Image (cartoon, rainbow, N blue to C red):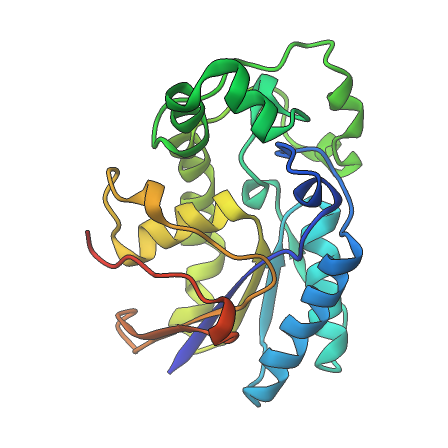
Amino acid sequence: MSKLILTRHGQSVWNAENRFTGWVDVDLSEKGILEAKKSGQLIKDLNINIDVSYTSFLKRAIKTLTTILQENGLELKFNTSWELNERHYGSLTGLNKEETKNKIGEEQFKKYRRSWDIPPPPMSENDKNQSLFSPLNASIPVGMIPFKESLKDTYKRVIPYYEKEIQKHIKENKNVLISAHGNSLRTLCKYLFKISDQKINELEIPTGNPLIIEFDNNLKIQKYYYLDKNRAKTIIFNQ
């Protein structure tokens, strides 16, 4: 029985400041570093092999993954992919969430933040936050970098990458670790747990708390559970 381990990066500096982060390459906060270490320790307690690892182009996810691997005494060998990046928050990038909600109203705020297919306004080409993007983005093919994304847009890049590059290892009965982001992991959970467009807005992914998904040989989910029970969130299945 193969295991897929999904870990949202530890708290970032902008998480702590309650800002829309998206593609900005911010670092882990002190709390986030501790969450990453605890994630590694919780995974170590499972006493399983981690055969293949994946992460995004963003340092908060990369540092979380490398910390987990170090805690497990594993070689720092992993795959990075822009397709696993956080959702691009367009012109909301860098803004304080509470201030933005007060400015545009709670209804519009919820649509931008939690709807399935409504993106925020696009980021302008001269937005100062673009200089804060990961330097790894330089390898993304011309024309592929978005200026805004809905969750649906994020789904359209995460799931094809999962089906092409990651799923094959699960079919080979290997244990796979993915360190990524709240929204890229929400789209993957939508796909794996068959969550409806209407219910996906209810799914929360906690930082630094590994979610274990166990598959049988036919890629059917047998079990799923968070390792830190005290910080677990409800998993919505087939709704």
Q: Residue furthest left?
A: 239
Q: Nearer the viewer, residue 231 or 237?
A: 231
Where residue 135 appears, x then y in whole percent? 79, 35
216 vs 89, nearest the viewer:
89
Q: Nearer the viewer, residue 3 or 196?
A: 196
**Which image quadrant for residue 53?**
bottom right
Res 113 seen here: yes
Residue drawn at 63 percent across, 48 percent down: 56
The image shows residue 81, relative to residue 64, as above or below, that is: above
**Left or right: 187 with respect to 227?**
left
Q: Is residue 217 above or below residue 209?
A: below
State the residue in front, 144 or 70.
Answer: 70
Residue 145 visible? The answer is: no
In which quarter of the view is residue 193 placed? bottom left
In the rendered image, which quarter contains the N terminus? bottom left
Count of marks placed on residues: 0
Q: Position of residue 5 (x, y in %)?
A: 50, 69
Residue in the picture at 47% in, 47% down? 161
Which residue is at a point 61% across and 62% down the rendered structure image?
208
Q: Is residue 138 left or right of residue 207?
A: right
Please determine whether, in this image, residue 126 is positioned above or below residue 201: above
Please state the horizontal and vertical placement of residue 123, each as a whole percent of the image: 61, 15
Image spot of residue 118 (x, y percent): 38, 22
Most distant residue in the front direction:
102
